Image (cartoon, rainbow, N blue to C red):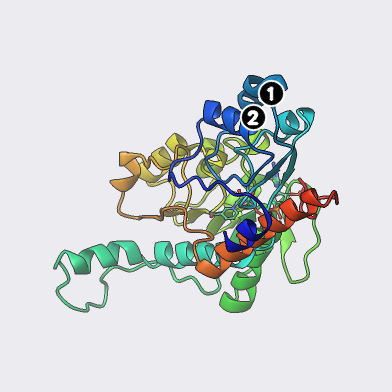
Amino acid sequence: MQAARARFEVTLREAERGLLVDEAAQALCDYDAILPTLGDGFAAGAFAQAGGDIRCTVLANFGVGYNHIDVSAALAAGVQVSNTPGAVTDATADIAMTLILSTCRRAGEGERMVRAGQWHGWAPTQMLGMHVTGKTVGIVGMGRIGQAIARRCHFGFEMPVIYYNRSVKEVAFPARQVESLTELAAQADIVVVAVPGGSETHNLLDADVFAAMKPSSIFVNIARGDVVDEPALIAALQAGQIAGAGLDVYAQEPAVPDALKAIENVVLLPHLGTAALEVREAMGQMALDNLIAWDEGRALPQAV
Ligand code: NAP
């Protein structure tokens, strides 16, 4: 904020919920530049509603994921869009590891047991989970975050890495690309989702994928909620088709289905992927650098 105020006349929106589509339309008419984030409704309808009154010519998104912005509608309306790739990669990969470890080793369940005064001491067969070291991880979406997760799994946990990606991808460490999601699901002990959200990936992880997973395997999503068919995931967990899930993101955030909360072997985080101060500062600086480039008439360094 200090850096932004030093350069621009800034209005800060303090509300915690995202802009509704009509509020986004109004913002497009009121400001030259907007620094939006997750949940702000820059859908096609916002650009249509603002129509010829659009004053804004740049949306410098705070975050790498921009599925809340209809980029084609923005560009057609003369509004450039940028995001913050890279700044979020390690922190989000760390949250994926948090979910892998805490789901496999039943940390959520154990923590609830201790807090409830239900722990009566160490026992040889108590709360046995899945040993993580050496298990096969399957990454869906081998981009920046997918590779950062894979690197942690390979170098830190001696895990064989397989991955499914839209295009053919070479990576700089041992990892094998597979042809289909069901092939990945059938071979992995832990499936981790790291693809962008949006129409191309909507419900990419569906009932067929869960049916192909081993009953002993766990599912982790740090990408976007709309990438997963959430009712199909809940059904697979309830039926014991998969052994557990670790989730940072949900289809209708901040709503988390009661059916998920009722399942013990599920670890639920409140979209914590980038939630560390230095990471959020780096994201803010990157978004601001794009606004400065726009202001100086240069190409946006992180245009999408
Ligand atoms: P990225 O570098 O663009 O990687 C995305 C990868 O997904 C690319 O390798 C891409 O393949 C692949 N992909 C795209 N569509 C696909 C499809 N239909 N099928 C299979 N693979 C597909 O993005 P990133 O920086 O890793 O970020 C990934 C996503 O993580 C973001 O978009 C965001 O939604 C999410 N995220 C979440 C948090 C959080 O707080 N939980 C934080 C940061 C990011 P190509 O190689 O063919 O392009």
Position of 157 relative to 13 (above/below) = below
Residues at badges 2 and 1 in contact (C-beta under 8 Å)? yes
In the rendered image, residue 8, in percent from the top left (x then y), is placed at 66, 52
Q: Is mark 2 within 8 Å of ligand 1?
A: no
Q: Which residue appears at 45% of the width and 52% of the height?
A: 215
Which of 127/55 is in front?
Answer: 55
Question: Is residue 297 visible in the rendered structure shown here?
Answer: yes
Taking the view exactly as shown, the residue that stands out farthest to the right is 298
Q: Is label 2 in a helix, a strand or a loop?
A: helix
Give coordinates of residue 25: x percent, y percent: 60, 28
Residue at mark 1: 53
Residue occupying image coordinates x 22% and y 79%: 122
Q: Which mark is residue 29?
A: 2
Identity, as a three-letter code, of the amino acid under mark 2: Cys
- Give me the residue at 53% from left, 30% from top: 23
Side of 242 where 41 appears, left or right:
right
